[in-house]
């Protein structure tokens, strides 16, 4: 993957299914939505970059960032 400060244009998909097809079509990236499972290893085998989704509390779904205990649990 680029490490030479050149622009990196993403050609990718959401999810980690059908990675062989993605790589074969010239894709270079995936985006996950939570636990990566084996997605990181599978992507590395195909030289794909990964935007790893982290599950965090969302206020619109009821998470209260003024609750110090819940915030500490989330950080843990």
Image (spheres, rainbow, N blue to C red):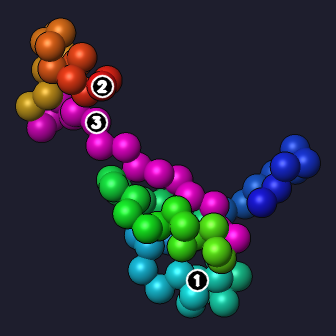
Residue situated in front as seen by the camera: 50 or 8: 50
Give residue 61's position: percent from left, percent from top.
Answer: 12, 38
Does the residue at mark 3 contact the one at mark 2 (Cβ under 8 Å)? no
Q: Which residue position holds label 2?
A: 76
Does the residue at mark 2 contact the one at mark 1 (Cβ under 8 Å)? no
Marked residue nearer the N-terminal end (1 or 3): 1
**Residue at position x 21%, y 34% from top?**
58
Give residue 57's position: percent from left, percent from top.
Answer: 22, 33
Other-residue count near label 1 (Cα within 10 Å), few / some / many at <14 / 14–19 / ≥20: some
Looking at the rendered structure, the secondary structure element under dot 2 is loop
Q: Work out which quarter of the rendered image holds the C terminus and state it.
A: top left
Q: Work out which quarter of the rendered image holds the N terminus and state it.
A: bottom right
Marked residue nearer the N-terminal end (3 or 2): 3
The extreme left residue here reads 62
Vertical arrangement, residue 33 with respect to residue 19, above or below: above
Vertical arrangement, residue 10 with respect to residue 7, above or below: below
Which residues lie in the magenta part? 47-61
Other-residue count near label 3 (Cα within 10 Å), few / some / many at <14 / 14–19 / ≥20: few
Vertical arrangement, residue 4 with respect to residue 1, above or below: above
Which secondary structure class fits the magenta region best? loop
Other-residue count near label 2 (Cα within 10 Å), few / some / many at <14 / 14–19 / ≥20: few
> Does the image show residue 55?
yes
CA–CA distance in space, label 3 to label 2: 11 Å
Q: Which residue position holds label 3?
A: 56
Q: Which residue position holds label 1?
A: 22
CA–CA distance in space, label 2 to label 1: 34 Å
Give residue 31's position: percent from left, percent from top.
Answer: 48, 60
**Residue at position x 72%, y 60% from top?**
9
Looking at the rendered structure, the secondary structure element under dot 3 is loop
Q: Is residue 61 left or right of residue 34?
A: left
**Residue at position x 63%, y 67% from top?**
44
57 within the magenta span: yes
């Amino acid at each position: 993957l680029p490490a030479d400060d050149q622009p990196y244009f993403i050609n990718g998909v959401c999810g980690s299914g059908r990675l062989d097809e993605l790589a074969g079509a010239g894709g270079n990236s995936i985006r996950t939505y939570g636990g990566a499972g084996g997605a990181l290893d599978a992507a590395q085998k195909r030289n794909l970059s990964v935007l790893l989704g982290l599950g965090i509390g969302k206020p619109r779904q009821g998470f209260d960032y003024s609750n110090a205990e819940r915030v500490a649990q989330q950080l843990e």
